Amino acid sequence: EGRRYLDFAGGIAVNSLGHGHPALVAALTEQAGKLWHVSNLYEIPGQARLAERLVEASFADKVFFTNSGAEALECA
């Protein structure tokens, strides 16, 4: 019916990225052809670039990616 909605809900172990946005679908499709998951034990160039962008766009001096809230608390 042409209605638009903002998705502010997140589930368990998921990202709140909306549903089927063309740019997100394209990025996920491209990445699926390369690599799906790598542990934080290894250097990930794309992750390093994202960390630099987050530092530039925020108050943070560093970025630490975690797999869970427990890891985030341990880091803190």
Image (tube, rainbow, N blue to C red):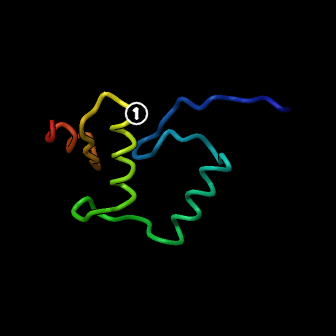
Label 1 amino acid? Answer: Ala
* Tag 1 secondary structure: loop
Horizontally, is 5 left or right of 62 in the view?
right
Q: Vertical placement of 16 versus 58: above or below?
A: below
Horizontally, is 43 left or right of 32 in the view?
left
Q: Vertical placement of 10 versus 14: above or below?
A: above
| Residue, far right | 1
Crowd class of label 1 (few under 14; some 14 to 19; many from 20; radius 10 Å): few
Q: Quadrant of the N terminus?
A: top right
Q: Residue at x 48, y 36 (%)?
A: 10
Judge by depth and name the residue closer to the eye, 65 or 9. 65
Percent across and percent down for residue 15 are 46, 43
Q: Quadrant of residue 53?
A: top left
Q: Residue at x 65, y 48 (%)?
A: 20
Q: Vertical placement of 48 versus 73: above or below?
A: below
Percent across and percent down for residue 44 are 33, 62
Q: Residue at x 27, y 42 (%)?
A: 63
Judge by depth and name the residue closer to the eye, 10 or 72. 72
Q: Residue at x 33, y 38 (%)?
A: 55
Q: Quadrant of the C terminus?
A: top left
Horizontally, is 14 left or right of 2 in the view?
left
Judge by depth and name the residue closer to the eye, 12 or 44. 44
Q: Which residue is mark 1?
A: 57
Percent across and percent down for residue 35 are 44, 69
